[in-house]
Image (cartoon, rainbow, N blue to C red):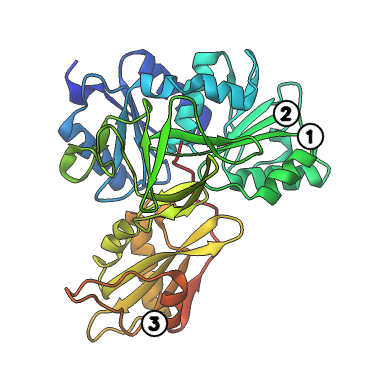
Amino acid sequence: MPSADRIAPIRGADHAAVLDAALEARAGGRVPLVGDERWTQGHWDAVVRTVRSHGVPQEADWATFTSGSAGTPRVVLRTEASWRTAYPAVTALLDARAGDRILVPVHPVSSMALNAAAHARATGLDVRVPAGARLRATDLAGPDGPELMHGTPWQLRDLVDLLEAGTRTTLRGVLVGGDRLDPALAARARAQGLRVASYFGAAELSYVAADTGDGLRPLDGVDVQVRDGVLWVRTPQRALGTVGAGGHLTAGALQDDDGWVTVGDRARLEDGVLVPAGRADEAILTAGATVVPADVEAVLTGIEGVQAALVVGRPDALLGQRVAAYLEPAPGTVLDAAAVRRIRSAAGERLAVAQRPRHWRTVPELPRTGSGKVRRLDAGQAEALAGETLVVRPDASPVGDRA
């Protein structure tokens, strides 16, 4: 089969059917590429065309998204073996038993969801998906209720809120990834009788370290180092590479150094415990999704009326971070409320759900570096430059993409 023909594009509103189709495509020797049904058809067509223009290496089994960017999609290619090597650890973290039902509330476009489904198929678990975008009481119990859940901190919070309100559940264990788990939330979940484990990883590296209550510790077979504050990893879970703009397969964010790689995460090691400290490349982690500011900025500055854009992550108690956009108007342009609504609408057609800013501000002028590039600022510095808040809408949470 030609390498381009091995790609199996899949998306749809029935998430259980999407996951089943992905598993069947993989079993048939094809490489499933799962998209988001909320993307425009034009965006989805462009993503599929980009991947097919390169084709995939013969050894590739899975294609997953790391940032879901529009125009410059980042699709991570990996082997089945790179995931399978971590299955024993995942089974132990979940305390999974053959025949257990596992609830996967993460959108199928996420590598976390595909990884969870692949692990379930390999270990005799039965995958369940919730009825809607948010967990409900009916998802948690009943004669076919799940014993396990694999999701994000945002979804664990929904679960705990339901249980504390009196909802009954058949769940006994939860595995949490995609973002840092608040210890207070983990304690609340354990107080409800749940076994809780969390992990730290990346779409390109899969599982790096796990925490069952005593801090994040590297998984067996995974070596970690911190060099100048940046985390380096040596792991058999490493992906083959990333398909980027133009359909070229590259190492992506991975940087080789004698078998060690990094995706730019900052961290420190304290007595064998890994303490993450955010992305060195300013990536925004929002409800388990990784958003690269430069990708969003490129889309915004391509919209009429925008001279320059700065995208940052604003702290958010529920999502970890919320994507915020600061817009500098083009010369002779006034970015009033109507203009920003137009920009927001245009951006929504070109950006993946996780990338869409939830907080919009205008600024008279964004600061530049000596070379004329927009200077990177943190959320506080950006807010100090801002003018009137024009659009603030608490949209539904983005999907998770790390696994």
User: Tag 3, which secondary structure?
Assistant: loop
Q: Earlier in the sequence, mark 2 or mark 3?
A: 2
Quarter holding the N terminus?
A: top left
Q: Are marks 1 and 2 in contact (CB under 8 Å)?
A: yes
Give left or right: position of 372 versus 83. Answer: left
**Crowding near the residue tagged with mark 2, few <14, some 14–19, many ≥20 C-alpha atoms within 10 Å:** some
Give left or right: position of 276 versus 256. Answer: right
Depicted 114 relative to depicted 73: above or below: above
Q: Are marks 1 and 3 in contact (CB under 8 Å)?
A: no
Judging by the rendered image, the residue that carries numbered circle 3 is 336
Judging by the rendered image, the residue that carries numbered circle 1 is 193
* Residue 161 seen in the figure: yes
Depicted 127 relative to depicted 312: above or below: above
Depicted 373 relative to depicted 241: above or below: below
> Gap between marks 2 and 3, in whole Å?
51 Å
Judging by the rendered image, the residue that carries numbered circle 2 is 172
Give left or right: position of 267 versus 177. Answer: left
The amino acid type of the residue labelled 1 equals Gly
What is the x, y in percent for residue 71? 25, 51
**Crowding near the residue tagged with mark 1, few <14, some 14–19, many ≥20 C-alpha atoms within 10 Å:** few
What is the x, y in percent for residue 220? 49, 25
Q: Earlier in the sequence, mark 1 or mark 2?
A: 2
Give left or right: position of 311 versus 71. Answer: right
Q: Quadrant of residue 375?
A: bottom left
User: Residue at point 30% right, 83% down?
Assistant: 365
Q: Earlier in the sequence, mark 1 or mark 3?
A: 1
User: Residue at point 63% right, 50% down?
Assistant: 182
User: Residue at point 27% right, 29% down?
Assistant: 240
User: Tag 2, which secondary structure?
Assistant: loop
> Gap between marks 1 and 2, in whole Å?
7 Å
